[in-house]
Amino acid sequence: MNQQASVHVPFVDLTPQHQPIQSQLEHAIQTVVQRGDFVLGQALAEFEQSFATASGVEYGIGVASGTDAIALGLQACGIGVGDEVILPANTFIATLIGVLEAKATPILVDCELDTALIDLNAAEKAITPNTKAILPVHLYGQIVSPHQLLDFANTHNVLIFEDAAQAHLAEREGYRAGSIGKAAAFSFYPSKNLGCFGDGGIVITTDNSIAQNVRSLRNYGAPRKYFHADLGRNSRLDTLQAAILQVKLPHLPEWNHSRNLAAQQYDKLLEPLASKGLIPIQNHSSTGHIYHLYVIRVTPACPLDRQTIQDKLAEAGIQTGIHYPIPCHLQPAYQYLRYQVGDFPHAETLSQEILSLPMYPGLSDQQIHHVVDTLKKLVVSC
């Protein structure tokens, strides 16, 4: 009892990933420093190709962030003013910002309650003559069904642009994240399954013309130096960050596997608590789910409210998160889009129920047991 109470469980701990490859990371950084090609350098080109190949596509173009990857990727696909892009209300705000920065019109739709992924039936009802793209978010590490997405796109003649910021090498139905649609955006924020030492992102695609467009847009709109053919910006993945990512990429399958095993352990241990209203977000992808986050729902059947559970877990040394507490359509800055409370009931319900438990490669069985045993004591004793 006392031993378990002393267990500390951070929400994310990067140490188990970084310690074994510390010398490789230092060498990669030093190589860039010695070469001096800090912008659009050799390590960037190498990583772009490596990540694209690992994802099952031909081209990768590193950019400054996942948000820019969405905005520049959409622009490169020809999406812009007057074009409607369907996306879920249940996502991080960067998805919405990316659409707006591409100067397209965001059309928000609801999500499924059990998986938290975009509801394609709701998306179908949102189709208009101006709909040019659907932007599925592969949330928490689980891909939206590729077969359903492709059927949707073919039926309605719309482009698929994937937000895969949480889905590095995730798989479903024989597809890897980023290989389903015309192009895809990834983030390399430090806590992502594949993270750098700051901000970073990439657009991947099978289309050479889109790849060339992104390369121009990220570099002041210049397909060649001092020749500015596009209305671009400064959004380049730093060579140092690319070198770090290149070292980490070969370890990603192992890290993703570790996350999936931890999730299986959570699933098994949490099963008895379903009757107490604690229900994990469903996995429809088996081992293809890479669990960037492990999320449970604190439903009305639970005797304790979410805040109380979160506070009690913190007292027991267990850090948690909420992804995300306010749906996009209810964020104060975007009220001008004229959405209201009640427009997307599933997204709004989840925002009040979801709780993200600790999840990272190297999370120990002891730590997982401590999390679940603490939850059990809280809700069973009520």
Image: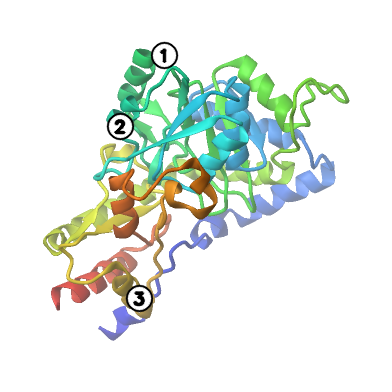
Residues at badges 2 and 3 in contact (C-beta under 8 Å)? no
Front residue (pair 185, 241):
185
Give the percent coordinates (x, y) of residue 39. Answer: 79, 39
Q: Determine whether the residue tagged by mark 1 lies in a helix, strand or loop.
A: loop
* Disc assigned to residue 311: 3
Query: Residue at coordinates 37% horizontally, 14% vertically from top-left?
Result: 154
In this picture, residue 227 sits left or right of residue 305: right
- Three-letter code, disc 2: Ala
Give the percent coordinates (x, y) of residue 287. Answer: 30, 40
Q: Closer to us: mark 2 or mark 1?
A: 2
Name the N-terminal-most of marks 2 and 1.
2
Q: Quick check: 20 above or below 101?
A: below
Q: Determine whether the residue tagged by mark 3 lies in a helix, strand or loop.
A: helix
Q: Closer to us: mark 3 or mark 1?
A: 1
Front residue (pair 90, 243):
90
- Badge 3 local density, few (<14 within 10 Å), some, or many (20+)? some
- Where does label 1 land, which residue? 157
Front residue (pair 382, 12):
382
Q: Is residue 262 visible?
A: no
Query: Residue at coordinates 34% horizontally, 68% vertically from top-left?
Result: 367
* Disc assigned to residue 122: 2
Q: Quadrant of residue 325?
A: bottom left
